[in-house]
Image: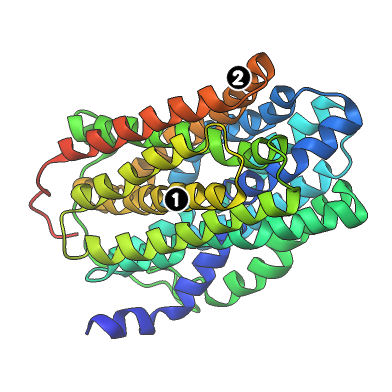
Amino acid sequence: MRESELLNHSGLLISACLGVICSSIVLPFYSIGVFVIPITTEFGWTRAEFQLAILFSTGTGIMTAPVVGMLIEKFGARIVALCGLVGLSVAFLFAATTSNLWQLYAAYTLMALLGAGTIPVTWTTAVTAQFESQRGFALGLVLSGTGLCAVLIPPAVAFITETWGWRMAYIFLACLPVFVSGPVVLRWFWPPGETKGKETAAAPVEGLSLPEAMRGYRFWVLLVSIFMVYIAMSGMVPNLIPALTDAGIPVTDAARAISVFGIAVIVGRLTVGYLVDSLWAPGVAFVAICLPVAGSLLLVDITSVHLAMFAAFLLGLAAGAELDLMSFLAAKYFGLLHYPRIYAWMYAALALASGIAPMLFAWVFDQTESYDIGFMVGSGCFMIGAVMLLMLGRYPRWQT
């Protein structure tokens, strides 16, 4: 039964979702926008210099993602996840001691290095292996953790920063992987083949090897589409709070816009996840990713917090579609045989875009004292990424 597949593995879904919330790609990304103004004001850095920290984080992620894929195949997703959660907490504690740029960059590098085991490759490997008939919806539920992070974390970090300072906010973030996600993952995150108390054989799977996948055009179409969408998404989201604050919108209201973005991510995740289980996934993705084209343009010369929230909602729908579909499409078009390695390379494209974009958008601001050019470029990137997905064609023969 479709319902029993979700109910029978609810512990896996909950633990994986919390793991996504406290992952090295999500937690630093959605919290950094709150730190931009207080830290650059204290130390006199430019916003581009500060946002470059994300490039150090995701740049390291580009190198570690393929390694994580291999480690999962060798040691299993569970041990990789638990080590990553502990490592990420250590890195956030180091960020709280920042007093110069190199320490900031080192801290964000450590977030990606020590927290490498928390990236979506780990959590989606378990879910894609466990679920079949409702794989899309299960992935949507788990990856909704990114939206929950966007809803809950920026307001909490903003409150702590305004009340006790940004260093205490980093300490708060350091507590989340170990004390919130860690116990739940330890209790319930048991992927197929890693069952508690004994080793079990995983079901036979089909699929392509990494070299076979890379020789096909679909691999590169999906990879470039991911890159284009995340250039736009990763450029806008971390700079949204500073952009709205510059427009005269209070920082607490700007943080609310990010929360609206997070709600939209959840809506997009669940809606798209449900639809792709019965409809052609690239077509569903095309519709979802076209929506933020208008949202990006609404942010040009933004003055209304309500309009900003609507734009953030449209952006969130796209974010909710793309990461979910990256997992679903990788499994659907390339199979499960070497899913961790293939998905890890897709994630590397995401990480590269996520690292470059915040600094580029901040650099545009430093040169023009406006984010408007970045918002217009982002609109075009969304459109290109959406159209490319239509090139994927029919699903392969195997049933995944």
Q: Residue 2 placed where, x, y %?
A: 24, 80
Residue furthest toward the top?
A: 367
**Element type at mark 2:** helix
Amino acid type, callout 1: Val
The mark that comes first in sequence, 1 or 2, is: 1
**Element type at mark 1:** helix
Task: Give the residue at x 60% y 52%.
Answer: 257
Q: Is residue 116 left or right of residue 233?
A: right
Task: Give the residue at x 40% y 53%.
Answer: 317
Q: Residue 195 placed where, x, y %?
A: 44, 75
Task: Give the residue at x 36% y 72%.
Answer: 200
Q: Distance of mark 1 from mark 2, alpha carbons?
A: 32 Å
Q: Nearer the viewer, residue 164 or 254?
A: 254
* Few, some or many residues within 10 Å of mark 1 (<14, 14–19, 20+): many
> What label does residue 364 carry, if any?
2
Amino acid type, callout 2: Val
Q: Give the tally of numbered discs.
A: 2
The residue where tag 1 is placed is 121
Q: Is residue 48 left or right of residue 194?
A: right
- Asked if the residues shown at circle 1 and circle 2 are in contact, with their CB atoms under 8 angstroms apart, the answer is no
Q: Residue 153 placed where, x, y %?
A: 67, 58
